[in-house]
């Protein structure tokens, strides 16, 4: 399924922050609601318990007053005690009515019903019997039962309060556990969301970075396409337009080099043939000064021919950068072939060649590897002093084949090491600049090594020290050379 990005990178950031913050806001809201419910339940429980306890204790006090007034009436028989009894009974009825309207447990309602029933029986006894010895004898027992039920009501109320407090504690533990597990569940969710949006945000940035690096490295074959917000997609389209323009400019440069090289070869041939005729004396004998001039013409025509051939070779390299005639190659034989091809200049400068080559095979383009190594050896010969030593090493390193070429020349200054692989670049160091060259050899080396997915490095040393490595495996089939 294709991802649909918003129209701008800023919108993507805002959406990402909003979605990542949503679980945190949900957790805060859930916690607030849980604590609000707990607080409300605690308030209700405490308020109800306090009201029931107050009413129960007030009812117990009124029962005691009823008992006292009823006994005084049964003994003295005076109306004032009967009025006191009736006043206390009115308070008793008021409290029982209040209790009946409150939230009571079943045990509390059972005790309240017993109290109302017992008090009604006492009231009937007082109303119908009057102040008699029989009333005085029965009242203590009746009020004893009534008082006992009143105390039971208080005790059951205390138990209900304890039970409510226990329920509050259990509810608090439940709320705490719920919040804890909610936070535990939100941690991986938040991490997943953060990781997802980090990928979505970093993906187009990485693609832009890779596209710019690809352009900087001169890799124009792969189109640049950015998948992301609309503004990043437009940036990718601009980079791809730049890639097309660079391809066009590179093709124009290559055609210019090819055309100029071919155009220069015709007058160069005439110039060289004329200098050869002069030097050979075909048009007449020359004095010493004339022969010197003819020699200078002849040498410079040869040098100019080499430069033109270098330009043609460089153009050919760019024309073939997408093609590899790869096969299993014995690299030690390639080294020996290159050294044999350069035997004449080696002997002319009385140089020594030290070979330290292991038995290494690789899946590669033999001709391109030969040209790469020949250019490195040619540079070493060119910049080394007479009777100097050139060392060539070949060995395996993990899954790579590695070449090292060392000489005893002036070396490569640190400031030039990043630029010497650019086409036509020649170092600013005086001894090196004094040696003529096209400045294309190392550029061709780098092109061929990159084509093999390898790399070339300049290492420290008394002279120039190049290290080349490239994979020995067959691309795509994981087939390793023996």
Image (cartoon, helix red, strand yellow):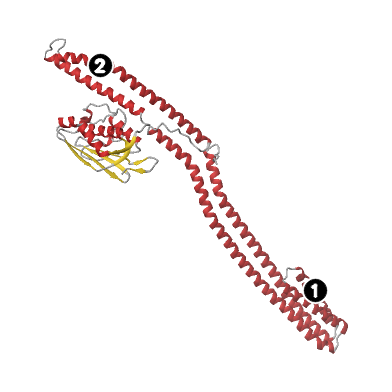
Label 1 sits on residue: 93
Q: Is residue 419 shown to the viewer in this render? A: no
Badge 2: few (under 14), some or many (20 or more) residues near its Cα, within 10 Å? some
Residue at the extreme top: 284
Q: Residue at x 34, y 19 (%)?
A: 259
Number of the front mark, 2 or 1? 2
Q: Residue at x 56, y 47 (%)?
A: 19
Residue 49 relative to residue 393: left or right: right
Q: Which residue is more in the foreground, 88 or 409?
A: 409
Residue at the extreme right: 128
> Which image quadrant for residue 382?
top left
Q: Position of residue 113 (x, y in %)?
A: 78, 75
The circle on residue 167 is none
Q: Quadrant of the C terminus?
A: top left
**In the rendered picture of this protein, how many numbered marks are placed on residues?**
2
3D distance between C-alphas at marks 2 and 1: 137 Å
Q: Circle 2 — which element?
A: helix
Q: Circle 1 — which element?
A: helix
Label 2 sits on residue: 269
């Amino acid at each position: 399924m294709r991802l649909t990005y918003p129209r701008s990178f800023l919108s993507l950031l805002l959406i990402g922050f909003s979605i990542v913050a949503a679980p945190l806001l949900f957790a805060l809201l859930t916690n607030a609601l849980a604590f609000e419910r707990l607080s409300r339940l605690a308030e209700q429980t405490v308020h109800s318990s306090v009201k029931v306890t107050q009413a129960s204790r007030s009812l117990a006090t009124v029962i005691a007053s009823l008992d006292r007034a009823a006994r005084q009436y049964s003994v003295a028989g005076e109306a004032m005690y009967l009025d006191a009894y009736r006043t206390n009974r009115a308070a008793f009825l008021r409290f029982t009515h209040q209790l009946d309207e409150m939230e009571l447990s079943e045990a509390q309602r059972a005790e309240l019903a017993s109290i109302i029933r017992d008090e009604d029986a006492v009231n009937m006894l007082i109303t119908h019997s009057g102040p008699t010895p029989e009333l005085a004898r029965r009242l203590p027992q009746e009020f004893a039962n009534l008082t006992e039920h009143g105390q039971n009501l208080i005790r059951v109320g205390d138990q209900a309060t304890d039970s409510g407090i226990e329920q509050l504690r259990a509810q608090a533990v439940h709320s705490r556990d719920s919040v804890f597990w909610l936070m535990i569940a939100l941690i991986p969710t938040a991490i997943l969301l953060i990781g997802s949006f980090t990928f979505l945000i970093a993906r187009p940035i990485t693609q832009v970075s890779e596209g710019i690096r690809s352009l900087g490295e001169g890799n124009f074959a792969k189109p640049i396409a950015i998948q992301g917000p609309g503004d990043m997609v437009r940036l990718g389209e601009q980079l791809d337009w730049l890639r097309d323009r660079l391809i066009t400019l590179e093709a124009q440069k290559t055609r210019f080099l090819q055309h100029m090289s071919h155009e220069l070869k015709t007058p160069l041939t005439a110039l060289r043939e004329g200098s050869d005729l002069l030097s050979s004396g075909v048009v007449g004998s020359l004095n010493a000064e004339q022969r010197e001039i003819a020699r200078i013409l002849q040498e410079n025509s040869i040098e100019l021919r080499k430069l033109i051939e270098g330009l043609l070779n460089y153009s050919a390299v760019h024309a073939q950068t997408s093609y590899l005639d790869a096969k299993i190659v014995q690299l030690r034989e390639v080294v020996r072939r290159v050294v044999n091809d350069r035997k004449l200049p080696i002997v002319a400068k009385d140089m020594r060649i030290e070979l330290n080559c292991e038995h290494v095979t690789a899946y590669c383009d033999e001709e391109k590897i030969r040209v790469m190594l020949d250019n490195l050896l040619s540079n070493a010969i060119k910049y080394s002093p007479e009777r100097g030593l050139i060392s060539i090493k070949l060995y395996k390193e993990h899954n790579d084949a590695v070449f090292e070429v060392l000489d005893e020349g002036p070396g490569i200054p640190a400031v030039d090491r990043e630029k010497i692989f650019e086409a036509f670049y020649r170092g600013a160091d005086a001894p090196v600049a004094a040696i003529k060259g096209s400045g294309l050899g190392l550029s061709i080396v780098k092109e061929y090594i990159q084509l093999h997915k390898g790399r070339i490095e300049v290492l420290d040393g008394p002279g120039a020290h190049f290290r080349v490595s490239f994979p020995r495996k067959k691309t795509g089939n994981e087939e390793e050379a023996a």
